[in-house]
Amino acid sequence: MDFFFFFGSLYSYLSVMRVEALAANAGVELRWRPFNVRAIMVEQDNIPRRNPVKMQYLWRDTERRARRHGIAFNGRPPHPVDADFLANRVGVVAAQEGWCPAYSRAVFNAWFRDHQAPGDRAHLEAQLRALGKDAAAVIARAESQEIREAFDVQTDAARKLGIFGAPTFAVGDEIFWGDDRLEDALDYAKGASAR
Amino acid sequence: MDFFFFFGSLYSYLSVMRVEALAANAGVELRWRPFNVRAIMVEQDNIPRRNPVKMQYLWRDTERRARRHGIAFNGRPPHPVDADFLANRVGVVAAQEGWCPAYSRAVFNAWFRDHQAPGDRAHLEAQLRALGKDAAAVIARAESQEIREAFDVQTDAARKLGIFGAPTFAVGDEIFWGDDRLEDALDYAKGASAR
């Protein structure tokens, strides 16, 4: 199952914290795919941030759903974040190198629990060091043309699947939008592997 | 618990078919409140119909969720519907007179199963007669100034609660958006009545 998410999306937090254990229990293999949902939403003129009534609800709902799932929620963290997509591009590096789950949990935890905005370089370096990485080397790679293009490739793959928001789970061409469809997506993935 | 919904909203279909049994099982009293979500969405410039990528998904998801809940889905029904809100205003009459649940199920079933657009007068009359109502008298009441104003009162109540979509469940000031939050809303309502 492909897990399309974005460092900067509220509901991606819930999925980042939940998906690995649930997928393992379901026997479903996961591919972590950070992508530029912001670009897609701008293309589609789909900007919830412009609607303060809806945004108010989305924060409240994220808080309630976090509590329901036993995930930390410590008041509203900074938002929007990762203006130049550095946290996301490091996520692409991490996915290529196989340490995306731990990296993602570290970044989203720091964002929601400690209100450290993803993409803030000082915090990012500390997070990478805590994961045993050479922070300068990882960030240099994330700034490279190769990784910028790899990030665009993920976004293009999402676009082709008809993805319009994050998180989205994809099983082949079948997409499931939102943390609240994670269980449906896993059920579908299990059915697909049985077929 | 207040059930704000709209004759014309995809996901309201799922809730109309599910809410009564679930609320009864939970011991939660329900108030059926048709309201003009279209007016609110236009005010907030929140028009999913303008985004074909998202609309494609919303239909697919409605179909999948209907199947999951054992609710009929017979291909895409007409949409948008009820341009002059007649089906909704009859819903206001029905809510005042205590027959909104049966009326709503009849209209939504006819829409999704038989592709009869809500608000189509010939179908509406047949549906009202099947419910043992004097169709002409009910429709005359639905066209009255009193019921038009009562519909606006529902919409204003929704607006004041911060509602931006349908269906929405409200327990006091706490709102839950979407058929997929029905269970959360009922849990909250049970907790609220215990407090």
Image (tube, coloured by chain):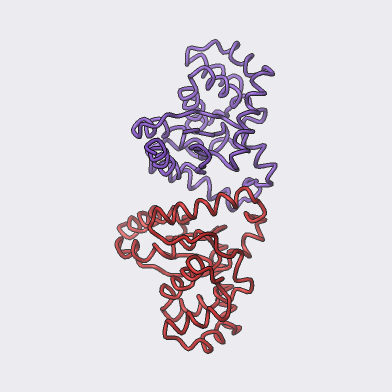
Chain colours: A purple, B red
Total numbered labels placed on residues in the image = 0
Q: Nearer the viewer, residue A190 or B174?
A: A190
The vertical placement of B75 against B134, above or below, is: above
Q: Quadrant location of the C terminus of chain A?
A: top left
* Residue at (29% x, 62% y) in the render: B25
Q: Quadrant of residue B193?
A: bottom left
Q: Residue furthest front?
A: A195
Q: Residue visible at 46% across and 85% down?
A: B129
Residue A38, compared with residue B16, is above or below; it is: above
Question: Residue B106, percent across and down?
Answer: 45, 73
Above or below, comparing residue B180 to residue B159 in the picture: above
Indicate left or right for A64 with A127 as reference: left
Residue A191, how many percent across, how many down?
39, 40
Between residue B102 and residue B194, name the one nearer to us.
B102
Q: Position of residue B127 (x, y in %)?
A: 48, 79
Q: Quadrant of residue B140?
A: bottom right
A139 left or right of A173 in image: right
Q: Residue at x 46, y 55 (%)?
A: B176
The answer to whether residue A83 is above or below residue B108 is above
Q: Is residue A161 left or right of residue A18?
A: right
